[in-house]
Amino acid sequence: MRKVLITDDVSAVLLEGLPGLGYTFDYIPNITFREVKDSIHEYEGLVINSKVFCGDELLRNASNLKWIGRLGSGMEVIDTVVCDTRGIKYFNTPSGNCKAVAEHTLGLLLSLMHNISKANYEVKNWQWIREQNRGEELSGKTVGILGYGHTGEAFAKVLSGFDVKVLAFDKHRKDFASGSVFESNYEEIFEQADILSIHLPLTDETTFSIDFNFLNSFKKPIFLVNTSRGKVLTTADLIALVESGKIKAAALDVLENEKLSELSQQEKDVFQLLIKCERIILTPHIAGWTHESKRKIAQKLLEHIALFSA
């Protein structure tokens, strides 16, 4: 029997399905990187989420490894060049949680535009404030979407129930316009958008690409939501533009460094500014974190493994 190492929490769908494909497995969701590195030579398959980086340090010991399965979409945790060199197959599961991300993005956006989070806090603190919490309607707005992969497209779909115009840009995808979704570019988004939703993968090109100059290029004050990766956005620049009014309000499900106990002093200083800004909503990277998505991600990964093993 071939062996698989599962390094993170996963739905029972995967655990129940692997034996039928001819695999045994070690399910160790609390395993450390060092422990993975020391034992990786024993395994033909490796299942990861985000805590184990599959680069040369790990893979040089992976003498029997044939494939890596990523629970989720982000491929920044896999050095694909090293994998290609070593003949290791890799696959991710972006379609498994894209609907969850889309719904969470919509929830954050509506909370921003209708002051839901702020008003909830005030009422629970015996403050009944109405006029200052008068909101804005999503209907009639123009939404810019950066990145039109699985999650960007899923977000556009949930927006289809609203009377909005969607301007979507994706460097690697063309001819996707349909209905109220228009294939666009930065210039049109800067000129027309009332809202910006970020759905970019983290690559060398996208890292900190959404910075002061980028955001300052919008002609109108905008609402901003980022449910992709924290390091595509320069947080300090975002805070400055929210405080200046250039950005009306923002919601972040992701941060530059999500290990809050390991922040540098500079990162702590920025985080303190972030949490003090009442016009910024934060959630702990849970956009794609639903009971349904956990099951669907495992099912999609199992399908990839089945195809590879056929």
Image (spheres, grey):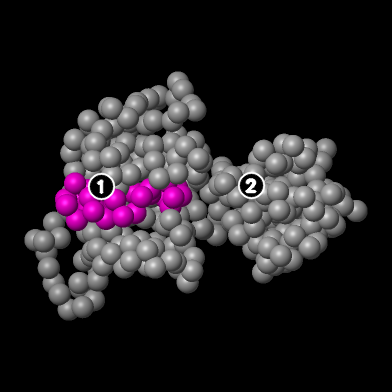
Of the 4 image quadrants, the one containing the C terminus is top right
Which residue is label 2 attached to? 78
- Is residue 204 or residue 181 the one in the foreground? 204
In the picture, the disc for residue 223 is 1
Residues at marks 1 and 2, CA–CA distance in whole angstroms? 32 Å
Q: Position of residue 15 (x, y in %)?
A: 74, 59
Is residue 249 within the magenta segment?
yes
Question: Would residue 33 appear left or right of 225 to someone viewing this image?
Answer: right
Q: Secondary structure at mark 2?
A: loop
Q: Position of residue 50 (x, y in %)?
A: 59, 56
Q: Is residue 202 visible?
A: yes
User: Does label 1 or label 2 sit earlier along the sequence?
Assistant: 2
- Is residue 276 or residue 147 the one in the foreground? 276
Is residue 56 within the magenta segment?
no
- Residue 170, relative to residue 262: is it above or below? above
Q: Is residue 300 visible?
A: no
Q: Provide the residue span drawn in magenta.
A: 225-250
Task: Please tell me whether mark 1 or mark 2 is closer to you in this view.
Answer: 2
Q: Amino acid at mark 1?
A: Phe
Q: Position of residue 237 (x, y in %)?
A: 29, 50
